[in-house]
Amino acid sequence: MIGTRRTMGDKLLFLKEAPSNTEVKVGIGALVIHNNKILLEEREDCSLWGCPGGRLDPGENISQTAIRETKEETNIDIKVEGVFGIYSDPQYGTIRHYSGDKKAQQVIDIYLLATPTSFNIKKSDESLNVKFFHLSEVPSNLTPFVKEVIEDYKNNESNKTTILK
């Protein structure tokens, strides 16, 4: 693969360039913020921390996807507040290849800002760990795209404009 960045689990690779057989997918992430803390999950597929989220299922809207994925991965219920940012640039880790897949994926990640309405955290089989971190104390081993999302949130908190990258 071109320009791979290996992860600890080797189930998921982040690519710097798109191979010719790359498919484009839509992913939805939930930027769940409460009292200056962010909800993160340590992903089973790469052992890196990220926001809850996943693929848009046919027939769903983006809010439904964020609510469903957050509940499935963390057991937390959320209220979606709006669109935070849209990330498609490969420099932010949007091109991914899962081991066993024949094609890579360039994911257009849409991050929705959300607040939790429940706090009974339970990790799923997709997660090694789930917890809230203070925004000034997030782990260093973040997925490339979530690292960018968190920095954008910290730098844009008072501006409230949608990030496009």
Image (cartoon, grey):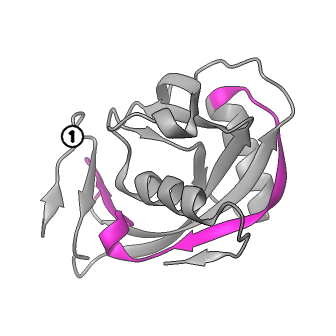
Query: Residue at image x 33%, y 60%?
Result: 96
- Quadrant of the image containing the N terminus: bottom left
* Amino acid type for the residue under numbered disc 1: Asp
Relative to 40, 147 lies left or right: left
Q: Is residue 100 magenta?
A: yes
Q: Secondary structure at mark 1?
A: loop
Query: Residue at image x 53%, y 63%?
Result: 152
Tell me where residue 84 appears, x and y as whole percent: 68, 65
Q: How many residues crowd around disc 1 within 10 Å: few (fewer than 14), some, or many (20 or more)?
A: some
Query: Residue at image x 77%, y 49%?
Result: 114
Relative to 100, 60 lies left or right: right
Q: How many marks?
A: 1
Q: Is residue 103 above or below residue 35?
A: below
Query: Residue at image x 73%, y 67%?
Result: 83
Q: Which residue is mark 1?
A: 10
Q: Which region of the structure is painted magenta?
A: 74-101
Q: Is residue 68 above or below residue 153?
A: above
Tell me where residue 89 appears, x and y as whole percent: 39, 77
Relative to 106, 67 lies left or right: right
Q: Is residue 52 magenta?
A: no
Quarter residue 145 falls in: bottom left
Tell me where residue 107 appears, x and y as whole percent: 46, 68
As drawn, the residue found furthest toward the left would be 2
Relative to 146, 52 lies left or right: right
Tell me where residue 164 appears, x and y as whole percent: 56, 79
Q: Is residue 34 above or below residue 91?
A: above
